[in-house]
Image (cartoon, rainbow, N blue to C red):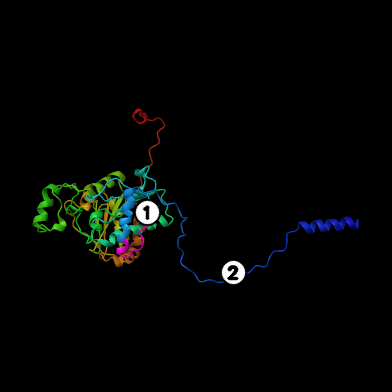
Amino acid sequence: MRISLTLSLLLVASCAAPPSAPVVAPPEVAEVAVTPTTPTPQAKPVLSAALKAWCQRTDVDFKKYNWGASRCDEFSWSHVRNSVDGHPIPWVVFGDETNLANKNVTLIMCGVHGDEITPVKFCYDILYDLKDFHWDFSERVVVVAPLVSPDSFFKAKPTRTNARGVDVNRNFPTQDWTADALRLWKAKHGKDKRRFPGHKSLSEPEVVFQVNLIKRYNPAKIISVHSPLMMLDYDGPDLKKDTTRPAKDLLLSMSEKASSYKVSNYPHFPGSLGNWAGQELGIPTYTLELPNSDPHQSDKYWKLFREAIHHAIEQRVGPTPPEPPVSATPSPSAAAP
């Protein structure tokens, strides 16, 4: 009996959990800012020979302006059209391009005028941000074209106009172009070569590129980055209407999130993006004019506007697309192929 009891006690002891280790309080550490985790390294996309050469040319200017490596070869570029001098005009898409009508699509374009240096780096900072940090693209798509006018930017001395001497922000096919573009260029600008609108609208490949990009993605909003007028401008549906309240709210909140950056009602011109896309197509178009074109200020401007850009990408400026009506018996037209 004593042997049996002893065995039972040993058996219980062998099945019992080991004594827990004493709890040691973790050492106190100073609170630090939470930053996004480093992304998992991914294989670089395969680029065409033209895009490889374009990225190499971009790196030259990044070194010229002390911006470091451009990381151009890390992005999955789309490329259809070239500039006058044959440089690619590519863009990058973040998010799923299917079912665009039901998604919050934001189009961001920079480098429209080659002598406005800081906007080019600004768009690349947007690219880095969208690629490196963990964005939710399930309901949104962001399209970024960082260098709309490469010929004018790649020059030893960058210019406002493209290789044919045309201001590609005065060449859009606006309704008033034929009557007013050349007339106002002569009367108001004294034939200033920097503002030449061309001999006819939509004559420049850089403008055709922008028009086709807008038609392809039908963005809910457009952000065009320029310098050096130091303001935030809006073109689009009348902000006094109740239906445009989201567009107005976005304008004001972008300003607020950038240290109350100046909002200005700048006039639009024949052949300008704001006139064509904003006034005529009714797409809320926000022109962000950075304070200057000094390449050494680029990082400063990104820090100033980063939160505003994040907010603009996240916000819808129109009503949420309605759910399709549920019908028990679809009509013959709806069922037809």
Q: State yes or no: residue 64 in magenta.
A: yes
Q: Does residue 325 appear left or right of residue 185 in this picture? A: right
Q: Which residue is mark 1?
A: 73
Place residue 120 in its image quadrant.
bottom left
Place residue 226 in its image quadrant.
bottom left
Query: Residue placed at 42% from the left, 57% from the top?
Result: 132
Is residue 198 shown to the viewer in this render?
A: yes
Q: Amino acid at mark 1?
A: Asp
Tell which residue pokes out farthest to the right in this image.
1
Of 256 and 75, nearer the camera is 75
Q: Position of residue 164 (x, y in %)?
A: 17, 52
Of 291 and 310, nearer the camera is 291
Q: Is residue 268 above or below residue 22?
A: above
Read off the magenta span. 62-72
Q: Position of residue 143 (x, y in %)?
A: 33, 50
- Mark 2 Cα shell of 10 Å, populated few (<14), some (14-19), many (≥20): few
Q: Amino acid at mark 2?
A: Pro
- Mark 1 Cα shell of 10 Å, populated few (<14), some (14-19), many (≥20): some
Q: Which residue is mark 2?
A: 26
